[in-house]
């Protein structure tokens, strides 16, 4: 039995294919169109899913959609009518997409030639299913926190075997996700894109209650002891405009919305720190309430807020939960996985038979295709004699401070590069963070890089949860790096002494694991820098063509693609960004 899940028309469109309850393929549309956070109908992702099994659309038994469009349209109409006439301009801008696309999703799916059942699941239930039904837990508490679904912005409940019950919810316009996004916009970053930048920036600010912006921000969100909250809507305009902070919020925080051309200063850093403090405080209160009501030892999280690794790394220390699971594509892209799993396990009442052990669910390009691409484009390359040769040479190059584009196997599902579409570098070089930010990623200098470490070495270098938690394998947990290693690994140690690590197990990705180990053998430190194989403003690379273009437009020195090694300087005819790199 095949089930296809679809998520689209808001942000991070995606498709997921299940076969007899097991995830066979999943990918975001952005990886194919090269439009970051593409929200269009995921036709390319759907075609990839079908091609992965060599089937056509009518081999699919059920198609599932990640929300209920009519229910969401009801909220949008209420939102605009309630704010009329202030909302008139936004209403007129938003209606065409509703009338031509969002309310006509059935027609769009039928145009693919699909003639069978199309099922709709509420947005937060799709999130809940994406977290619980593929988790290793037979029974668990569930918490969903995002911007907004149809009406719901936060919900929690209980999962048991193949059943999910959502017990309580908070509804729009009161939203922890939209609160965080509003301040993201105020700080000059792009909403629904750069919240993780604010998380990184927060470490540079004052993370104590003496921070003056903590009390200022607490004026706009009323948090109860059980974690429930209300926003003071006088400080927001997202319910009737295409922006988020109000003039009153700007006055409260002591200045206008930051423009991109203006530098970040201490005030911006303190605002980010205060915001992160309030998010963590609220989440911990909510989680304590969830534990009190459900009395579970396990917790699963989903929704965009579940990507906040700084908060995630504190959950087990500050609550009574013993184990945590977060699905690697926990924001909207993961809801295609959720709706497909919900149809199979809940609607069809099939027993769960799948645990999501890794995120390697995307396209894979075999050596024959890659060789043809290289030869056809007259790209100079060499070929490794064996995996052992590949690992030794690559580790040696990294030790010599060469930056490596690492392209191996199936592309990752979700926002993090986990060793299939990664850029790897030397964490021992104190200048490597600046080199990567300036010459490769072309991004803000305050942004940290992730350390990748093998599972048996984690507790040597990090003050991590014991036992190790699965989300650390998906780069979703931030932990303190032990102080004695701060100077040893300067380019992965954030300003506050933490790292958003990725844990790797050999059974999950043996080539990647062996590379980290080999680097450790020749340097005595088995840790690498891992960052996503892309540049600022672009999605992670998908194909060899994407990867080669990215390499030739950045300061990446070499690319290890399957069993082939490409040196950037051997292909000067294709270097298109050399001036910027000088």
Image (tube, rainbow, N blue to C red):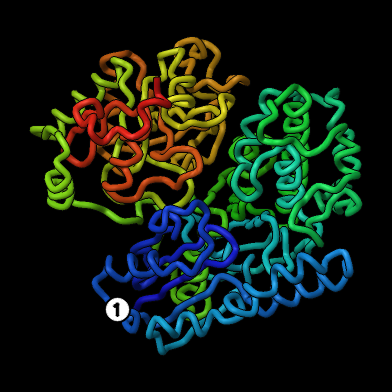
Vertical placement of 479 versus 323: above or below? above
Q: Quadrant of residue 522?
A: top left
Q: Quadrant where the C terminus lies?
A: top left
Which residue corresponds to the image point at 33% horizontal and 25% vertical from the top-left?
403
Residue 156: x and y, percent? 69, 59
How busy is the neighbourhood of tag 1: few (under 14 within 10 Å), some, or many (20 plus)? Answer: some
| SS label for mark 1 | loop
Residue 575 in sight: yes
In the orientation shown, which residue stands out farthest toward the bottom? 115
How many numbered marks have been drawn onto this rendered protein structure?
Answer: 1
Which residue corresponds to the image point at 59% horizontal and 79% vertical from the top-left?
100
Q: Name the residue under label 1.
A: 56
Which residue corresponds to the image point at 72% horizontal and 27% vertical from the top-left?
269
Residue 289 in sight: no
The one of 547 and 225 positioned closer to us in this rendering:
547
Residue 68: x and y, percent? 63, 76
Q: In which quarter of the image is residue 123?
A: bottom right
- Position of residue 114 in the picture relative to residue 275 (left or right): left
């Amino acid at each position: 039995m095949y089930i296809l899940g679809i998520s689209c028309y808001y942000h991070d469109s995606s498709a997921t294919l299940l076969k007899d309850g097991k995830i066979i393929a999943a990918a975001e549309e952005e990886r194919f169109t090269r439009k970051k956070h593409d929200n269009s109908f995921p036709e390319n992702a759907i075609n990839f899913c079908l091609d992965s099994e060599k089937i056509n659309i009518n081999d699919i038994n059920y198609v599932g959609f990640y929300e209920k469009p009519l229910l969401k349209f009801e909220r949008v109409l209420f939102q605009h009518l309630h704010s009329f006439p202030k909302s008139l301009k936004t209403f007129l801008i938003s209606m065409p997409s509703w009338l031509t696309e969002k309310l006509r999703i059935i027609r769009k799916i039928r145009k693919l030639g699909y003639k069978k059942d199309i099922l709709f699941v509420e947005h937060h239930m799709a999130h809940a299913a994406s977290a619980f039904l593929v988790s290793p837990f037979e029974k668990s508490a569930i918490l969903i926190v995002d911007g907004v679904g149809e009406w719901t912005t936060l919900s929690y409940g209980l999962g048991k075997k193949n059943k999910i019950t959502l017990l309580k919810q908070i509804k729009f316009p009161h939203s922890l996700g939209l609160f965080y996004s509003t301040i993201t916009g105020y700080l000059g970053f792009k909403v629904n894109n750069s919240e993780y930048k604010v998380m990184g920036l927060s470490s540079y600010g004052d993370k104590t209650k003496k921070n003056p912006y903590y009390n200022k921000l607490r004026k706009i969100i009323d948090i109860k002891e059980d974690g429930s909250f209300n926003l003071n809507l006088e400080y927001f305009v997202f319910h009737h405009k295409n922006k988020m902070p109000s003039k009153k919020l700007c006055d409260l925080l002591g200045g206008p919305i930051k423009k991109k051309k203006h530098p970040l200063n201490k005030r911006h850093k303190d605002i980010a720190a205060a915001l992160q403090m309030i998010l963590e405080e609220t989440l911990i209160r909510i989680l304590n309430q969830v534990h009190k009501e459900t009395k579970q030892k396990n917790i699963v999280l989903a929704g965009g807020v579940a990507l906040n690794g700084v908060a995630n790394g504190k959950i087990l220390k500050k609550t009574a939960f013993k184990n945590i699971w977060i699905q690697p594509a926990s924001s909207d892209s993961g809801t295609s996985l959720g709706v497909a799993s919900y149809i199979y396990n809940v609607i069809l009442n099939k027993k769960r038979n799948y645990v999501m052990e890794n995120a390697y669910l995307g396209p894979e390009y075999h050596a024959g295709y890659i060789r043809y691409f290289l030869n056809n484009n007259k790209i100079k390359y060499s070929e490794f004699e064996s995996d052992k040769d590949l690992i030794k040479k690559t580790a040696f190059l990294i030790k010599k401070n060469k930056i490596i584009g690492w392209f191996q196997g199936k592309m990752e599902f979700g926002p993090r590069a986990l060793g299939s579409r990664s850029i790897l570098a030397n964490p021992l070089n104190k200048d490597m963070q600046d080199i990567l930010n300036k010459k490769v990623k072309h991004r803000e200098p305050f942004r940290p890089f992730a350390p990748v470490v093998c599972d048996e070495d984690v507790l040597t270098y990090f003050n991590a949860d014991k036992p190790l938690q699965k989300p650390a394998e998906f780069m979703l947990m931030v932990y303190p790096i032990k102080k004695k290693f701060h100077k040893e690994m300067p380019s992965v140690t954030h300003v506050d002494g933490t790292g958003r690590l990725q844990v790797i197990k050999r059974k999950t990705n043996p080539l990647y694991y062996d590379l980290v180990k080999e680097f450790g053998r020749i340097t005595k430190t088995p840790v690498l820098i891992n960052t996503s194989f892309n540049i600022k403003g672009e999605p992670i690379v998908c194909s060899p063509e994407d990867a080669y273009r990215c390499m030739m437009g950045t300061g990446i020195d070499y690319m290890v693609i399957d069993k082939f090694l490409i040196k950037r300087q051997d292909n000067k005819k294709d270097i298109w960004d050399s001036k910027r790199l000088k």
